[in-house]
Image: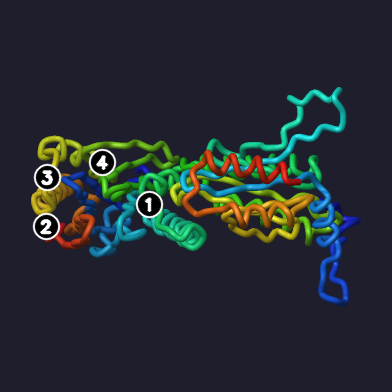
């Protein structure tokens, strides 16, 4: 079994009209045993940058702590928040530092950049960045997620509709994956507000 | 950077609370060629006179004003070789920032890091302070900016400033001539006039 499949995870980020949504499942397992059903995979770096980390739970938590550290110092030094593009470059650099002993994580970064333009990207565990205009997915359910997103995505969705689409894509994909699920956690971010919602799906 | 036999600093406090080495470094700066900078509404000007010791010197080989990034430049008063070392270090720092964030370094950050290097050399073992003051001119998201960095490592933001020989005359002249809404061309003109005063 791959180390990336040890804990199980599902992550999705999608671009809408002047907004974005980032969502994850809530299961934390140790192979086939479910340990927690409220595990947090998505973190707010600041109001306009969100980070999702799939893969090995311990690496996700440690990587998040390192990134928050770097971002807080950046905020103090430069007296401004990091743009999502800049944050993505930082994550990529940090991951590559561990090229020959990597963090077993696949990050998903979503944010509102200059003029509140939505930005999403993902990268592999050693920092190869992949920008996308529509959606990015990560985790053990990624193959199902790709299919669901491709089928359901439409450009320029309003926040409410985006929430529906992201939720449906997430829940239907994790149902096909035994290692992720136990509900969903969805953030829909617009320039003015952040709406956080918990989804109830098949609790298995 | 000071080996094990020189693990003590050569820059030490005098009883009056001064770091004499830094005072001497400032004297070295004060006897160097005049350099000045003026912040205009839409840009920054830095200038110095390229006075060559003899007509036989190849003037293209002398570079008194250098760029640190495509949008940040620097001029100095004091010791040329020390200036070159600082330019090299600052360029490297700017590139490291870019490598990490894929963004060009803001002027304040580069000035801060350069000043930190200069301060290091007032405390590290076996080294002397830099014998230059720098005028860093840059344009970034916060608009045009002008900073002076001293051998001690302190830095100041200026609207217009001068360093080196004849600094008091130059500053008086700048005080009279400077206006907040100067255009870049006016600033260039004023800079040349100020240099001529010396």
User: Who comes first in sequence, dot 2 or dot 3?
Assistant: 3
Using residue B9 as the reference point, say whether residue B95 is left or right of it: left
Q: Nearer the viewer, residue A57 or B55?
A: B55
**Residues at marks 2 and 4, CA–CA distance in whole angstroms:** 21 Å
Q: Nearer the viewer, residue A142 or B45?
A: B45
C-alpha gap between disc 4 and disc 3? 16 Å
Instruction: Quickly name the residue at label 2.
Output: A201
List x then y, in percent, for residue A169.
Answer: 13, 46
The reply to whether callout 3 and callout 1 are in contact (CB within 8 Å) is no
Residue receiving disc 4: A136
Task: Tell me the element at label 1.
Answer: loop
Q: Position of residue B58 (x, y in %)?
A: 80, 23
Tell me if B149 is positioned left or right of A68 in this view.
right
Residue in the picture at 52% in, 53% down: B179
User: Which numbered disc, 2 or 3, marks the residue closer to the eye?
Assistant: 3
| Circle 4 chain | A
Q: Disc 2 vs disc 4: Cβ atoms closer than 8 Å?
A: no
Look at 80% across and 53% down and name the residue there: B30
Answer with mark 1 or mark 4, whichever residue precedes in sequence: 1
Left or right of B170: which side holds A29?
A: left
Label 2 packing within 10 angstroms: few (<14), some (14-19), many (20+) = some
Q: CA distance from mark 3 to mark 1?
A: 32 Å
Location of residue A194 (image quadrant) = bottom left
Q: Nearer the viewer, mark 2 or mark 4?
A: 4
């Amino acid at each position: 079994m791959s180390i990336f499949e040890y804990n199980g995870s599902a992550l999705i980020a999608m671009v809408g009209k002047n907004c974005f949504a980032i969502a994850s499942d809530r299961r934390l397992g140790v192979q086939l045993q479910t340990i927690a059903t409220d595990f947090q995979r998505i973190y707010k770096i600041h109001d306009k940058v969100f980070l999702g980390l799939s893969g090995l739970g311990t690496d996700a938590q440690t990587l998040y702590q390192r990134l928050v550290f770097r971002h807080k110092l950046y905020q103090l030094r430069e007296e401004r928040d990091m743009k999502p593009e800049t944050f993505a470059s930082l994550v990529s650099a940090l991951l590559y530092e561990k090229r020959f002993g990597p963090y077993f994580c696949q990050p998903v970064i979503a944010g509102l950049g200059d003029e509140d333009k939505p930005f999403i990207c993902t990268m592999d565990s050693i920092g190869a960045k992949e920008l996308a205009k529509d959606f990015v997915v990560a985790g053990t359910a990624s193959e199902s997620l790709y299919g669901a997103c491709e089928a359901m995505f439409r450009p320029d969705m309003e926040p409410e509709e985006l929430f529906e689409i992201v939720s449906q894509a997430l829940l239907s994909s994790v149902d096909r994956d035994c290692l992720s699920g136990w509900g969903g956690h969805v953030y829909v971010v617009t320039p003015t507000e952040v709406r956080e919602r918990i989804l109830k799906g098949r609790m298995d | 950077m000071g080996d094990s036999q020189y693990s003590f600093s050569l820059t030490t406090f005098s009883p009056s609370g001064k770091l004499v080495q830094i005072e001497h470094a400032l004297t070295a700066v004060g006897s160097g060629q005049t350099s000045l900078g003026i912040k205009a509404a839409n840009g920054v000007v830095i200038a110095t006179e390229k006075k060559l010791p003899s007509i036989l010197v190849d003037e293209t080989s002398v570079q008194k004003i250098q760029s640190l990034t495509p949008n940040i430049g620097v001029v100095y008063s004091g010791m040329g070789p020390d200036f070159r070392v600082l330019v090299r270090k600052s360029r490297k720092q700017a590139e490291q920032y870019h490598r990490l964030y894929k963004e060009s370094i803001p002027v304040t950050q580069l000035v801060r890091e350069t000043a930190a290097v200069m301060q290091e050399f007032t405390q590290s073992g076996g080294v002397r302070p830099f014998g230059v003051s720098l005028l860093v001119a840059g344009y970034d998201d916060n608009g045009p900016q002008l900073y002076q960095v001293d051998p001690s490592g302190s830095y100041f933001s200026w609207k217009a400033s001068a360093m080196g020989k004849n600094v008091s005359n130059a500053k008086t002249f700048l005080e009279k001539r400077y206006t907040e809404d100067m255009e870049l061309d006016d600033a260039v003109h004023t800079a040349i006039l100020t240099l001529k005063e010396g």
